[in-house]
């Protein structure tokens, strides 16, 4: 897409070509299939599985394979680990996806304004971004939850507030790159408004790296929420993979399965999304393939 | 020289401004939160009398206009006073400095391990781009990115704890009392306690750096000057380790510097799992004790550390790569 004249055209063929390329990438398709399965399980699983994640169903600390034990064993209160994993995905994924959307919106708005208008607006917004970049993110999220209190809304806000700077910088860099292009100048010459140029002319071209970044942000948000839940700082009544690990942490030595499986669920979900992101990156930017 | 000095001066000025902004953010966070210090003191003493609380507010200057309070807060921080812990009843800065060594040791050891091994793996696989090991690096880096650090930490504990498959290393704390007074024993003991926490944090970053180093090395190895070096008959080892590595290492250094904040986040979780007596564990415990001066003090301190790390990265960058324009923008 370095050829200026065809840049707008190539968005169409470019994205179709990218889709074909994505589908040819086995690892990325595998990631997509796994993630779709996980999403389906979190949506329909709790209804289908039937066992409550909150109720005692067997004696505590039954390992997988023990008599009377559910498939993945029971935790310190005799609750079914598998039921917890099926139910626990909901909170984590919901918070992660909403936080990622929030992050993307912040990053997009601030980055596009800075990159498009440049000069003092750029300096001002970038200084503002830096403030959020130097505060260690998990610590900042902890402080926000500490001050506002736990709960799904505050958790989402805390995670969303900490992750946007990287996206703002990325968007800015893309806008800086595209705004001097011939077709953008042409759009300006025929009198398009700034808003139209930003979101109809430049944004579609800037989208590929941002999409890749968004997938990474979802993974980070999942890890973040899991970390907060693990530390016991989220809503105490919610069941999530992180909180299962946090509550069973003290028994990890005698009952490894109580922490191993929820953690594995986080890892597999994160890996599947990361594979999708990697596939997107290769598809949009074949030059970087395999790097 | 003067240009460099000016550039450094500008960077320093920006860094100080940045720290000031962090302090302002923290101050307003305190204001946003429900309740204030007087209310907490009142609750602790079991007193809810509004008149008494108003007296407390007057004593602590909480009834002054917001901007005046902000000014005095900034003045306080400028004098390295991060406030008084409500739990320990000690200055916050002292509490942090007591734990600084443990955190720096943990983070430094993890980073050292990750960078050294990561660059080695990166160089090794970049020279064999189509080998299975090379593709393995990509998958492993994604795996490292997706693995919760507290999970790997817990799994290390499960594997290495006493009575478990490999009970050869201590899985909690930072020292064993039996070595008190014997410095050699103490050092070896400290290093033994360090291995598992540093590994659990380090493997996450190892995954990132090995991929980064590999990508960077692949790119450099394709460049013209490397072809020239080979053409003139330079020894392959000299080409790779002298000519190529010097350039390939630049993105790694940048990333290391920029990830100090993220490293602190990871260290916080690892410290919590291993009972490692560092700043991160103090932060988590401060939340559980509702000790807000300590938590916010740590926030300011950690931000200051990140700013310093970014400054140092900037300097290191200039030392490695003289092409970087002084005071230039990216």
Image: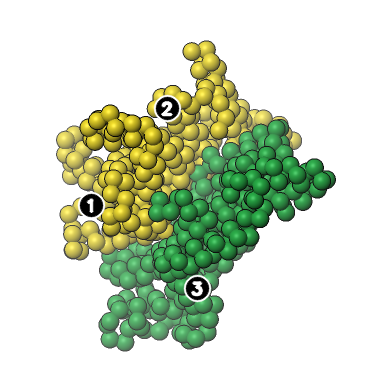
Chain colours: A green, B yellow
Q: Nearer the viewer, residue B294 or A216?
A: A216
- Tell me the SS state at disc 1: loop
- Look at 58% across and 49% down and name the residue there: A1
The residue identified by callout 2 is B321
Distance (Cα) linking label 2 and label 3: 45 Å
Same subunit: marks 3 and 1: no
Q: Image check: A121 left or right of A250?
A: right
The residue identified by callout 1 is B170
Q: Rate crowding at label 2 as few (under 14), some (14 to 19) or many (20 or more) other CA atoms within 10 Å.
A: few
The residue identified by callout 3 is A36
Q: Rate crowding at label 1 as few (under 14), some (14 to 19) or many (20 or more) other CA atoms within 10 Å.
A: many
Distance (Cα) linking label 3 and label 1: 41 Å
Q: Is residue A4 above or below residue A252?
A: above
- Say which of marks 3 and 1 sits in front: 3
- Determine which quarter of the picture holds residue B216: top left
Give the letter of the chain under mark 2.
B
- Look at 64% across and 50% down and name the residue there: A7
Give the letter of the chain under mark 1.
B
- Tell me the SS state at disc 2: loop
- Say which of marks 2 and 1 sits in front: 2
Q: Position of residue B30 (x, y in %)?
A: 63, 44
Same subunit: marks 2 and 3: no
């Amino acid at each position: 897409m370095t050829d200026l004249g065809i840049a707008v055209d190539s968005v169409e063929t470019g994205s179709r070509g990218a889709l074909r390329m994505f589908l040819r990438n086995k690892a990325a398709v595998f990631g997509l299939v796994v993630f779709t399965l996980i999403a389906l399980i979190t949506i329909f699983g709790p209804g289908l599985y039937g066992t409550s994640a909150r109720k005692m169903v067997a004696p505590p600390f039954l390992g997988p394979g023990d008599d009377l034990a559910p498939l993945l064993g029971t935790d310190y209160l005799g609750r079914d680990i598998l039921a917890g994993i099926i139910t626990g995905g909901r909170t984590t994924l919901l918070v992660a996806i909403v936080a990622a959307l929030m992050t993307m919106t912040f990053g997009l708005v601030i980055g596009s304004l800075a990159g498009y208008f440049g000069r003092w607006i750029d300096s001002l917004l970038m200084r503002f971004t830096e403030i959020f970049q130097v505060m260690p993110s998990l610590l900042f999220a902890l402080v926000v939850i500490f001050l506002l209190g736990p709960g799904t809304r505050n958790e989402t806000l805390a995670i969303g507030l900490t992750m946007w700077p990287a996206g703002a910088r990325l968007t800015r860099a893309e806008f800086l790159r595209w705004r001097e292009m011939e077709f953008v100048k042409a759009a300006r010459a025929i009198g398009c408004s700034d808003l139209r140029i930003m979101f109809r002319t430049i944004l579609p071209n800037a989208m590929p790296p941002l999409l890749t970044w968004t997938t990474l942000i979802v993974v980070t948000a999942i890890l973040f929420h899991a970390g907060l839940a693990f530390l016991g700082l989220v809503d105490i009544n919610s069941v999530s993979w992180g909180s299962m690990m946090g509550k069973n942490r003290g028994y990890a030595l005698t009952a490894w399965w109580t922490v191993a499986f929820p953690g594995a669920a986080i890892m597999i979900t994160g890996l599947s999304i990361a594979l999708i992101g990697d596939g997107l990156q290769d598809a949009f930017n074949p030059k970087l393939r395999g790097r | 020289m003067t240009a460099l000095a000016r550039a450094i001066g500008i960077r320093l000025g920006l860094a100080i401004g940045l720290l000031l902004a962090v302090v302002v953010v923290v101050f307003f966070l305190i204001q946003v939160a429900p309740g204030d210090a007087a209310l907490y003191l009142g609750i602790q003493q079991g007193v809810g009398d509004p008149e008494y609380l108003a007296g407390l507010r007057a004593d602590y200057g909480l009834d002054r206009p917001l901007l005046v309070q902000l000014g005095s807060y900034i003045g306080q921080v400028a004098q390295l006073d991060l406030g008084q812990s409500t739990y320990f009843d000690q200055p916050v800065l002292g509490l942090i400095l007591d734990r600084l060594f443990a955190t720096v040791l943990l983070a430094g050891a993890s980073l050292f391990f990750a960078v050294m091994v990561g660059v080695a793996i990166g160089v090794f696989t970049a020279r064999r781009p189509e080998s299975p090991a090379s593709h393995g690096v990509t998958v492993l880096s994604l795996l490292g990115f997706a693995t919760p650090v507290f999970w790997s930490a817990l799994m290390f504990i499960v594997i290495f704890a006493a009575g478990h498959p490999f009970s050869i290393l201590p899985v909690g704390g930072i020292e064993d009392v039996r070595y008190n007074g014997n410095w050699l024993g103490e050092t070896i003991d400290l290093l033994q306690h360090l291995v598992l926490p540093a590994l659990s944090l380090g493997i996450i970053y190892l995954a990132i750096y090995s991929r980064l180093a590999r990508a960077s090395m692949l790119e450099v190895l394709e460049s013209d000057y490397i072809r020239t070096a080979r053409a003139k008959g330079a020894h392959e080892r000299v080409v790779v380790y002298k000519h190529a590595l010097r350039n390939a290492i630049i993105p790694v250094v940048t990333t290391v510097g920029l990830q100090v904040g993220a490293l602190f986040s990871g260290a916080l979780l690892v410290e919590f799992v291993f009972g490692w007596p560092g700043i991160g564990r103090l932060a988590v415990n401060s939340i559980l004790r509702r000790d807000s001066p300590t938590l916010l003090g740590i926030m300011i301190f950690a931000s200051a550390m990140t700013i310093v790390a970014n400054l140092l990265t900037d300097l290191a960058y200039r030392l490695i790569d003289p092409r970087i324009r002084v005071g230039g923008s990216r």
